[in-house]
Amino acid sequence: MRNEHGLEGAGGAAALSFGRAPATPVAAPGIAERLAGRFAHVDLVPDLGSDIGSRTWWRGAATCAALCAATIALSPAFSLPVITDSTAPMAGTDYDETRSLAITPLALGANSGRRLGANALVTPLRDTPERPQIEATATLGAGEDFTAALRRAGVGSGDARAVADMVAARLALGELRPGTQFELTLGRRTDKDAPRPLEKLAFRAKFDLNMQVGRDGDRLALAAIPIAIDNTPLRIQGRAGPSLYRSARAAGVPAKAVEAFIRSIASRMPISRVGADDRFDIIVEQARAATGEVQLGKLLYAGLSGSSNKLQLMRWEEDGKSQWFDPRGIGQTTGGSAGMPVNGRLSSPFGWRRHPLLGYMRLHKGLDIAAPYGAPIHAAMAGVVQMAGRAGGYGNYVKLAHGGGMATGYGHMSRIAVRSGQRVSPGQVIGYIGSTGLSTGPHLHYELTRNGVPVNPGKVTFESVQKLSGGDLAAFKSKFSKLMAVKAGSSD
């Protein structure tokens, strides 16, 4: 370089300080650096949970195996003891104090605080004292025997049989409902091998009856305690709303009573006609015990009132059957055709024909239905047996009266299964197919008459209206008046 005077090399120090430095030689990389750079892409500790089966994974597995083998080879034998300093064993009060703070007291029943361990001053008991009495409860299981339930609760077999005999003399053991609770007290026993004697037993035998058993000396005595029951029916009224079922349930009507209410209403009118502003009136059986328990039973009365609907129905039971009648004592009107009493083939229709045996034209007053010999014959409708026996050309013959002047006849039976004066229901077997009387083969002669005039059974439709009369009607109206006097117990 040249300075301002043109001299080369002058002012070199100043030139260096102005911004130039002498060049420094770069050192060559060492062996470690070259190896690190060459194997920088190699992962010595790969994740063995990924890329399973690859070259990297196998290299990592081999590395892991080599490290484990080296660790096992360099480790001492497991049988060699570990030599270290140990404290002197404790004795006396120090041992008792330490033992009381260990986990042993927990096993002996302690749950909090500090429990001192037993020392030489504690003498173990040879015999553990028993409680003088034990109070227990038991529940009668479904299908379980009364005696077995008592024995399961700890009552001796002798006392259990004695109690069962006393209870059976007052109440059938089969009437005890599953789930009955027994509260009993067992006394002190004279021998550890003997069961504890029964001192007291109390249970609710029925809704209206409590039973108690107590010991009087060596004998057990039973006391039956009746419970006063109020059987005033429960009357619930309310608005039908969007859902008659939900509204009645929300008002407190039992589910089964609501279902019976809807069925009774539907038997007289379409349920779709029930409006949201209609009012329901429901009366159900109710038993209220003096002890506070309440049982609800069957539906007794179903009422519905509104702008276009008004219906009153009361349950009436006769001959074990329940039916619904309005306040006038008129029941449901049923209609239909006289059903065929036997499954078979129509071999001869109703009308004029030449008799197959007599050989001349004659009015055939019914239908001939060919069927296998001995096939059952069913009553086409409900009625009363007016005649059952031999009837000339009809052979074995049964005649049923159905009311309203209508009657049905069944002829040529092989055997009769009913008797005169008997009441039969629709579909009940009244006899069996045969060929008695003027008959050419096994078949049933089935005829229908109205006021004594024969009509074609296959073309007759009928209506049956159930209606109470006489003493039944008076009793019905008396019961209806009592129900209407019941005040509503729940309303919206």
Image (cartoon, helix red, strand yellow):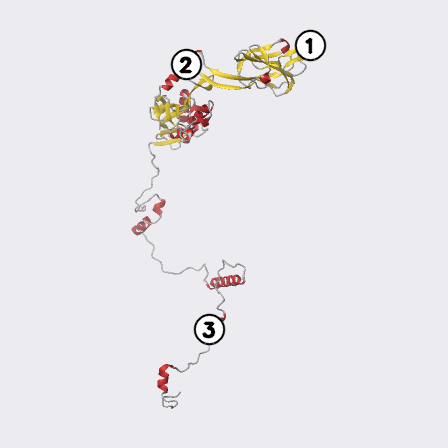
Residue 270 on image: x %, y %: 47, 25
Residue sitting nearer the eye, 32 or 222: 32
Q: Secondary structure at mark 2?
A: helix
The image position of residue 178, as x and y in percent, is: 43, 28
| Residue type marked 3 | Glu
The tag on residue 196 is none
> Mark 3 highlights which residue?
33
Distance between mark 1 and mark 3 Cα atoms: 136 Å
Q: Which type of secondary structure does the marked residue at label 1 adopt?
A: loop
For the residues carrying marks 1 and 3, which lies nearer the camera in this image? 1
Q: Choose the circle earlier in sequence order: 1 or 3.
A: 3
Determine whether, in the image, residue 492 is placed left or right of residue 465.
left
- Residue underneath mark 1: 360
Q: Is residue 219 visible?
A: no
Give the CA distance from mark 2 to mark 3.
Answer: 119 Å
Q: Earlier in the sequence, mark 2 or mark 3?
A: 3
Furthest residue in direction top, as rendered: 392
Q: Residues within 10 Å of mark 2 (few under 14, many from 20)?
A: few
Q: Is residue 442 above or below residue 120?
A: above
Check contact, mark 2 vs mark 1: CB within 8 A: no
Q: Residue 254 sits in which quadrant?
A: top left
* Residue 307 in picture, x, y percent from top left: 40, 24
* 269 relative to 123, above or below: above
Taking the image as shown, residue 111 lies to the left or right of residue 46, namely left
**First of labels 2, 1 by sequence position:** 1
Residue 347 visible? The answer is yes
Which one is in front in this view, the residue at disc 2 or the one at disc 3? Answer: 2
For label 2, the residue is 475
The number of callouts visible is: 3
